[in-house]
Image (cartoon, rainbow, N blue to C red):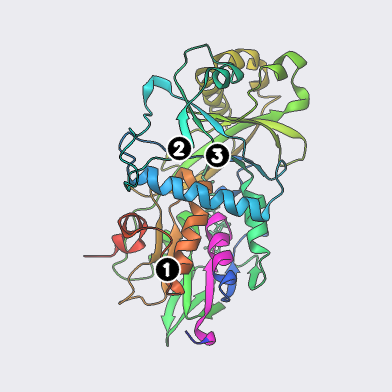
Amino acid sequence: MADGLRQVLVVGAGLSGSAVAYSLAKRGWAVTVLDQADGPGAGASGLPAGLAAPHVSPDNNVLSRITHAGVQATLQRAQALLQSGTDWALTGVLEHNIAGKRRLPALPPSGSPLAPSLSSQAASAAQIKAAGLPTGTPALWHGQAGWVRPRQLVAAQLQTPGVEVRWGQPVRGIERRAGHWAVTDAQGRSLGQAPWLVLASAYDSLALLQALPEVKLPLQPLRGQISFGHMAHLSAAQRQCLPPFPVNGHGSFISGVPSPEGPLAWFIGATFERDCTQTAVREQDHAANQERLATLLPALGQAMAKHFDPEHVLGWAGLRCTLPNRLPAVGPLEPQRLPGLCLSTGMGARGISLSVLCGELTAAWLNQEPLPLPPDLTRHLSAERFAPA
Ligand SMILES: Cc1cc2nc3c(=O)[nH]c(=O)nc-3n(C[C@H](O)[C@H](O)[C@H](O)COP(=O)(O)OP(=O)(O)OC[C@H]3O[C@@H](n4cnc5c(N)ncnc54)[C@H](O)[C@@H]3O)c2cc1C
């Protein structure tokens, strides 16, 4: 492709947009990222800390296989760009298998495409004890998993040479004119144009797509709140109850990670509220997170009860943006009718685990390379699955 055509506008500088920008800039593309906010982390990617952890299922289903590939991609990116222990850590994650919901795949014949990841297995007695759970509690151990601070990953990906980021750019219109995509603000003023446009503006992608006839993307907002507090406020006895690794299975608990203000913190979350677009922190959501902790890690929940008092507990809320099959919409939407238009949105509750893989997939599509996933998985991520029949 001629260099003049290897120019792309990316709308949205969260995990999705920054991952697309990174992957395309590494391939020599000129990337301009536009975001309406003043800096990184304005949307869901402002989450103070979250998990990159695989999904497992007895038949190693599509979601499990895609998530496994996604987590591997994220961990490699984190290793390359971030400071271990401060921005991310490959700690392993214990999954408290509440109500026996999760089952590992049975071992298929070796070489089978269903071969499960050997990095997920039944948790050992020592791991269950270290989490503070009673002996015999059903639990899995995901060795290739850990915590990530999304804003740090976003900032690092945006620093890639070849990526230009323009903050304070609220995109309100997109239009194809003379072989280019033009983006405009609310007054119709030009914010940029390029042969390629990637919408990575999470739930807001819906409003931008509404300008195009017959495009219907079933994106939904899904509010979530986490509760957190500084480790320094815990007593020595409470600190002794903290598991040395994150625990998930009914929300997730993470500790020993720098808070947005700096000091080390613990985090529990998150709530799920469909079709709610409000991001104010609420007291009743702290109460829901307290119950979540009491179910996930009962002894710790009891020990930390007073840290959920409204005057002590801190909170952060954001909007996940979901699609019906819990997988994002990635790559060209309708290459014939809308050439040059791509999506990377709908990361749902797994943006840390999926966005890097989706960035690589988008870049491989645009750069006309072999795709990083087999076709039977790629079609479940392809934005084209939402094109009108
Ligand atoms: C409470 C909570 C807990 C979570 N926990 C985890 C977890 O443990 N593990 C995990 O993998 N995922 C988790 N997630 C999900 C993860 O945070 C998201 O999937 C991910 O951050 C989405 O990234 P994004 O770039 O698609 O969207 P966003 O981060 O929302 O970024 C969208 C960007 O687009 C910009 N934008 C929007 N509209 C426009 C416009 N019109 N013009 C210009 N710019 C625009 C916004 O300013 C924003 O910067 C959690 C989410 C929440 C809310």
Q: Examine the rendered structure and indicate whether residue 260 appears above or below residue 267.
A: below
Mark 3 residue type? Ala
Mark 2 residue type? Leu
Mark 1, other Cα within 10 Å: few <14 / some 14–19 / many ≥20: many
Residue lying farthest to the left in this orientation: 389
Mark 2: secondary structure: loop
Residue bounds of the magenta highlight: 3-23
Query: Mark 2 against mark 3, which lies toward the viewer?
Result: 2
Query: Mark 2 against mark 1, which lies toward the viewer?
Result: 2
Quarter in which the C terminus is drawn:
bottom left
Residue 320 picture location, percent across and down: 48, 46
The answer to whether the residues at label 3 and label 1 have Cβ atoms under 8 Å apart is: no
Mark 3: secondary structure: loop
Residue at 54% in and 26% down = 289
Q: In this view, does 167 lie to the left or right of 66?
A: right
The residue lying toward the viewer, choosing from 130 and 165, is 130
Residue at 71% in and 17% down = 240
Q: Can residue 200 be seen in this view?
A: no
Q: State whether label 3 is within 8 Å of ligand 1.
A: no
Residue 61 picture location, percent across and down: 32, 42
- Residue 149's image quarter? top right
Residue that badge 1 annotates = 342
The answer to whether the residues at label 2 and label 1 have Cβ atoms under 8 Å apart is: no
The residue lying toward the viewer, choosing from 164 and 97, is 97
> Between disc 2 and disc 1, whose residue precedes?
2
Mark 1: secondary structure: strand
Mark 1 residue type? Cys
Q: Is residue 250 left or right of residue 253?
A: left
State how far apart marks 2 and 1 are (Cα): 34 Å
> Between disc 2 and disc 3, whose residue precedes?
2
Q: State whether label 2 is within 8 Å of ligand 1.
A: no
Residue that badge 2 annotates = 118
